[in-house]
Amino acid sequence: RLLREPNRYLGGARNAGARAARGKYLLFMDDDNAAKPYEVSAFVRAAESTGGDVFTSFVDFIWGRDAPAPETNRRYSGRMGSNTVDMEAKARRSPSFVFLGGSVDVGLFKNCFGDANSFFRRSAFLALGGYSEDRQLGYEDWELYTRAAYAGYTLQVVPEALYHYRFTAGSMQKSTSYSRSRKRALRAYTERLQW
């Protein structure tokens, strides 16, 4: 089902999609990123086997507009300690960035939770109230992950790069205010302070 709506910015668009969804899970992905062929199955397997509520993953970076190279979509299938492991090939398929999961202590200083490319139990996402809907700001994902961790939801990181994060010259990270976006990310912390 395709929804056509006015521009609600990131939080509003994702919330509208979540409300219209009918499945058990929600997968959020920015339109300039690229899923690896096994992303959905890996997230579902993680959710079904752990009972977690929110999932992110490691990430591989790509630059420009080109499609990711096909060899970057292959899964590493060797065993650690095996003499047959091709370490050079493994290194080429190692993630570009790793996240830690639901640590609100670390999250105060750095987004350790994960990128906006995420997988939620729909019931958890709706109970949290979804993303805040501020316009012209980033870090809506960081803010939501912090709220989820404080609310007792289980945030887990799949220890594999399941998608490619694309860097482009006109990306939102380069066109929004870092300081204002950072304040948004800290909102879940400052709301908990006793004045």
Image: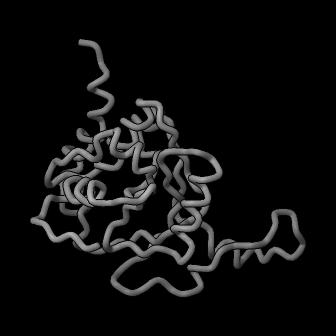
Look at 35% across and 71% down and name the residue there: 167
**x and y percentages locating residue 78 in the rendered image:** 78, 72
Q: Nearer the viewer, residue 44 or 187?
A: 44
Nearer to me, 183 or 140: 140
Left of 108 or right of it: where is 52? right
Q: Quadrant of residue 166?
A: bottom left
- Name the outermost residue toward the left: 6
In the rendered image of this protein, does residue 144 appear above or below residue 93? above
From this view, report whether residue 9 is shown above or below residue 145: below
Q: Residue at position x 62%, y 68% from top?
A: 94
Q: Position of residue 137 (x, y in %)?
A: 19, 51
Give the percent coordinates (x, y) of residue 81.
Answer: 86, 63
The residue that appears at 46% across and 73% down in the rendered structure is: 35
Q: How is the image coloured?
A: one colour
- Total marks in image: 0
* Place of residue 42 in the rendered image (x, y in percent of width and height, measured from the top left): 59, 64
Q: Name the quarter where the C terminus is drawn.
A: top left
Describe residue 153's horizontal placement relative to residue 91 as left or right. Answer: left
Q: Quadrant of residue 75?
A: bottom right
- The extreme right residue here reads 83
Direction top: furthest residue: 195
Q: Residue at x 57, y 53 (%)?
A: 47
Horizontally, residue 147 falls left or right of residue 16, namely right
Quadrant (top left, top right, bottom left, bottom right) of the N terminus: bottom left
